[in-house]
Amino acid sequence: SSPTGSPTSSPTGSPTGSPTSSPTGSPTSSPTSSPTSSPTSSPTGSPTASPTGSPTGSPTSSSPTRSPTGCVYPAWVQGYDYDEGDKISYNGYIYICRNKKGCDEGSRIPGEDNAWILEGACTPT
């Protein structure tokens, strides 16, 4: 099909409205000249609590402990620095760390992460 008419030298539509010289809406409420609330009470002259002279206890353990199930391998401890080949017990089973970078990341849970290989069930000692 072909165009219906020849081009014109000026647009055929007219603008929708002229700009105004001032805003059309009213401003929102004016700012206040002073704060709306009073300050809180003054600080005290000295701190209320003093630190203790020394720590209250020592760390519980820095190495794995014997498994409560009676396994000959230590119980798995989350966050402990395990190396490739280390054997641990977890939930009644024996696992071997097979990850060359170790199995010490907190998310590497035996039985849930392939960094640990299931070797078998624990046997009481």
Image (cartoon, rainbow, N blue to C red):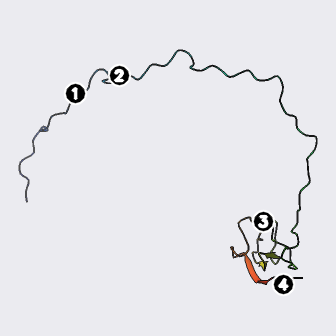
Mark closest to the chain's N terminus, 2 or 4: 2
Name the secondary structure under disc 1.
Answer: loop
Query: Could you tell me which quadrant the N terminus lies in?
Result: bottom left
Q: Which residue is mark 2?
A: 26
Q: Disc 3 residue type?
A: Gln
**Above or below 63: residue 35:** above
Residue that label 3 marks: 78
Whether residue 94 is situated above or below residue 105 in the rendered picture: below
Q: Compare residues 55 and 101 and report the one nearer the observer.
A: 55
Give the SS element for disc 4: loop
Q: x and y percent of residue 35 in the render?
A: 57, 19
Q: Residue 56 at x, y = what percent? A: 91, 48
Q: Are marks 1 and 4 in contact (CB under 8 Å)?
A: no
Question: Which element is circle 3 on?
Answer: loop
Looking at the image, is mark 1 or mark 3 nearer the viewer? 3
Mark before the other along the chain sequence, 1 or 4: 1
According to the picture, the residue beneath numbered tag 1 turns out to be 18
Q: Are marks 1 and 2 in contact (CB under 8 Å)?
A: no
- Looking at the rendered structure, the kind of residue marked 1 is Ser
Q: Which residue is mark 4?
A: 123
Which residue is at the front of the view, 28 or 37?
Answer: 37
Q: CA distance from mark 1 to mark 2?
A: 19 Å
Badge 3 density bin: few <14, some 14–19, many ≥20, Cα 10 Å: some
- The residue located at (75%, 75%) in the rendering is 99
